[in-house]
Amino acid sequence: MKVAHQGLALKNSDFNALAEDLQRSMDKEGVPFRAQNALLAKLAQMDRTVVTK
Ligand code: HEM
């Protein structure tokens, strides 16, 4: 994970954009709110691994 993203110079705004895109897609597909939050919480734990800038 770290190696895959380290050359991309990702910022918090990139990470947030991904989270928003995912949330919009899950809303569109009718994914229950609790399940959405469970996924987003898992991803949030990884922000220091992919955000380097
Ligand atoms: C927690 C959030 C994220 C997770 C779980 C995640 C997961 C992954 C995984 C599993 C890979 C493939 C690694 C491999 O090839 O073995 C990957 C690659 C990649 N990710 Fe992410 N990612 C996340 C956030 C982001 C964000 C925010 C961006 C950009 C907006 C991004 C852009 C990319 C790109 C461009 C690659 C391909 C890199 C390459 O092959 O050179 N990722 N990601």
Image (spheres, rainbow, N blue to C red):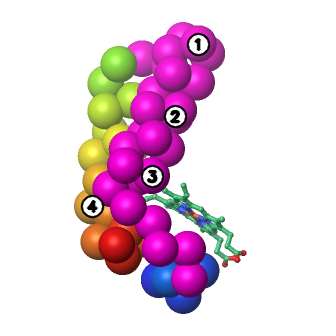
Residue 17 in view: yes
Where 14 sits versus 46, above or below? above
Residue 41 in percent (x, y) is at: 28, 46
Q: Of the two numbered discs 4 and 3 on the same chain, state the one appearing first in sequence.
A: 3
* Amino acid type of the residue tagged 1 in the rendering: Lys
Choose between 27 and 17: the one closer to the eye: 17
Q: How crowded is mark 3: few (under 14 residues within 10 Å), some or many (20 or more)?
A: few
The label shown at residue 28 is 1
For marks 1 and 3 on the same chain, the one whose residue lies earlier in the sequence: 3
> In the rendered view of the protein, which quadrant contains the C terminus?
bottom left
Residue depicted at x 45% and y 66%: 10
User: Gap in Å between the C-alphas at discs 1 and 3?
Assistant: 21 Å
Ligand 1 within 8 A of label 3's CB?
yes
Image x and y of residue 48, in percent: 29, 71
Q: From this viewpoint, is residue 43 visible?
A: no
- The residue beneath circle 4 is 45
* Real-space Cα separation, disc 2 to disc 1, in angstroms: 10 Å
Q: Name the residue type under label 3.
A: Asp
Q: From mark 4 to mark 2, how far is it between C-alphas?
A: 16 Å
The type of residue carrying mark 4 is: Gln
Please report the bounds of the magenta region as a residue range. 7-32
The residue that mark 2 highlights is 22
Front-most of residues 48 and 28 = 48
**Is the magenta region chiefly helix, strand or loop?**
helix
Closer to the camera: disc 4 or disc 3?
3
